[in-house]
Image (cartoon, coloured by chain):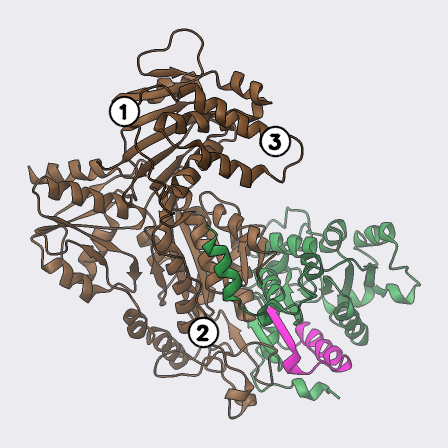
Chain colours: A brown, B green
Amino acid sequence: MAIDITVKIAGEAGQGIQTVGDLLSLVCQKAGLYLMGINDFESRIRGGYSFFQLRISDRPVYAPCPEVDLLVALNQKSYDAYHRELTSEGLSLIDIQGEPLANQVAIPIDELAAKAGGKIAANTVAAGACLGLLGAPIQILEGILTDRFQNKPGNVLEMNLSAARLGFDHVRDIGFFKKFKWKMESSKGALIDGSRAIALGALAGDCRIASFYPMSPATGVMTHLVSLADEFPIVVEQAEDEIAAVNIIVGASFAGARAMTSTSGGGFCLMTEGLGLAAITETPIVIVNAQRPGPATGLPTRTAQGDLMFVINASQDEFPRFVLAPGTPAEAFEITIRAFHLSEKYQVPAIILADQTLNDSIYIAEKPLAAPQKVERFIVDDSRMESPSDYRRFAVTESGVSPRALPCNGKALVIATGNEHREDGHTSEVDSDRITMMNKRNAKWPAMLSEMLPPETDHGESDILLVGWGSSKGAIRESADLLRKQGVSVGAVHMTDLWPFPADTVKKILEKCNRFFVVEQNSTAQLGRLIREQTGLAHNGAILKYDGRPFFPSEIVDGLKRYLS
Amino acid sequence: MVTIQDFDCSYENNWCPGCGNFGILSSMKEAFAALDLPPEKLLLISGIGQAAKTPHFLKCNLFHTLHGRALAIATGAKMANHELTIVVNSGDGDCYGEGGNHFMNAIRRNVNLTLLVHNNKVYGLTKGQASPTSDIGMVTKTQPHGVIAESFNPLAIALSLGAGFVARGFSGGGEQLTRLIQAGMKHQGFSLIDIAQPCVSFNKVNTHSWYKKRVYDLQQENHRTDDFQKALELSFLWGDRIPTGILYQKKTPSFTERLGIEKDGPIIRRKYDPLKLQKVLSAL
């Protein structure tokens, strides 16, 4: 029988939910299981309601499940809030005095932690107890704790080992319906969240300069990059605001470094001016927009897909750009590498459209993350010029891409301006210069379009296709699986390469089905609108969710059934 | 030997005849020649405004960017390649209005560049509105009852934020301005030269002759440039006597020194190492 278990660890912000979640995730990874864990938290440092919801399976999982098998309630308030999500045989681990309810397993977490050596080990007690209920061999957890604490001074390691054992032993004899045989296979892939995948993709894309202003849920990308900045040739600078962040990377790129920034929608608003500067000066930059609900401050710590139309159109007037949207960490890693490559090759901005669910959730990346052996640069110097003193940064070419030299790197002078300009880079208000430069920039579109990967289809021959993008990929695919099992002919289409829009390939895919529905985390079906604009094909319906929480597969199943009935 | 003529450029200059910018442009060329810096070794970065057009009017590498953002862009360029010699041309509106936050933070970071602020106390390119440095009471088309906000004091702000080179020049200062630009460029760290400049079209108060009567050279008066309190006091002096010259100078580690990136050569010249990265990836 397939393993499919959902563990929810709930408590107040600051109670150590993350620590328990990390330990459980690591144990599952080491045991060769698949997992997907979402982080749900409020915009606060202490108190409130937070949870980490971990789905564990022996098959790949990319979506959360709403039914909870094991609720670790770190306080009474969390039990009260979430016990209704427990399945009929589900249990809740809770530190209570007195007689537990039928679905409660009382565990004196703090007392056991104190016994182990300190209340600080409470999270380790909880992790040990969870694994005890699930029937896991404790040796994996002990190994992880040893790796983590063996170099800490004093009795930190002994305390944690003891805490894990006390928690584990306290519940080991309790019958739990989801106890399963742990096969102990080798790890199925990297344990990684979207933020880290983007950060590592940036290093693999040879990013040298990163600048940012802190903003949820995009800060994690930079936190991960900073943690590697001492080992790799990259400098990360926290800017005074998002306007500075984007302009710092424009300046860095102008000087020859691959450069990126990461932000969320509100910060992206401030960056649109710099985006335009990068565009008119044909300076490559990569911007990550990790979406959250808006407008304005919106829901700071939650998820959304409401910025698609915005990023495609952001900044005044018209210019070519790439918009790529990853659906999993493995995709985020690959897309970030491509974003740097494409941005530099075509000298245009590339926008990575991520979202809170992708950035903050952990997954097992089935595809190995591979660093490219070489990084192809698209820069020229005097040695490639007949006459460096005649160099013109914006020389007209058939492809629209002009040879790009760097300032102070030879005799060739690099002249660039955010004003409309001549081929030599000097400002011009001559009408023919304006037309020449607009046409030159627009000439890049066909080649850029040819770089776009087709959507990924699963059961593309089905009568009905569910079309989506971003982190809801896993939920959409799983909902199609569920519907097929119920006899409905449904396939899934996942788009990552959104702009330039690959209209021909999308049209070919969608023309084959009888009906298609878009599944999106916005309120107006933005991808559906884009598909109609670009292909003339109108979606037959839209399954939309915009409460700031990620899609569950069952919600999509229900959403489609409403259309079919 | 680099000569002033090496910076001659055929691009048409479109400033008003008599504009103070011409004096600044001349002093820049003279300073670059005196420092033996040829056009290809110079990167001029500017924002938007009449001052920000300056780089187009001499031969150099140049990035004429957005209103207010020149310093942020220069910061990024310096991070990528700390060996770049960067001079930023900005104006009072560009630097102290639109770019105020970047001005403060470039000083805080101590980015090693020279900032020339062409301060004519009025908006020129948009035709005569008050600027952050307009004196209180100045009447313009958009401030018909006179400016009501206090004037922005760049020198005092720069000093208070720890700037290591704070100077005031005068566009009609000729050789003195050339010397100031040279000294600013030699200073290893952020150098601010706020340049008092008339606007022949829109500022009928602070004219060339108005300044001529008031400006004096601190370096002619044995001013000690290491006296912070005195510098701060001088930064508030504006009226019958207007001090010019270096108010304050002190060497502190520059931005890229503080980042610790200078020892291994410019970031853009480092090597990509796939093996090292693969180790990190495989450990996940």
Answer with left or right where residue A207 lies relative to residue A183.
right
Q: Quick check: can you spot residue B50?
A: no
| Residue at the disc numbered 1 | A177
Q: Mark 2 lies on which chain?
A: A
Residue range corresponding to the magenta coloring = B18-45
Toward which corner of the image does residue A62 lie, by quadrant? top left
- When the figure is inspected, residue B157 is found, relative to residue B114, above or below; the finding is above
Q: How crowded is mark 3: few (under 14 residues within 10 Å), some or many (20 or more)?
A: many
Point 64% across, 46% down: residue: B148
Q: Which residue lies furthest to the right in this view?
A: B222
Q: Earlier in the sequence, mark 2 or mark 3?
A: 3
| Residue at the disc numbered 3 | A156
Q: How crowded is mark 2: few (under 14 residues within 10 Å), some or many (20 or more)?
A: few
Q: Main secondary structure of the magenta part?
A: helix
Which amino acid type corresponds to the residue marked 1 in the rendered image? Phe
Does the CB distance between marks 2 and 3 fall below 8 Å? no
Residue B171, how many percent across, how many down? 73, 70
Q: Which chain carries label 3?
A: A
Q: Nearer the viewer, residue A558 or B135?
A: A558
- Image depth: mark 2 or mark 1 in front: 1
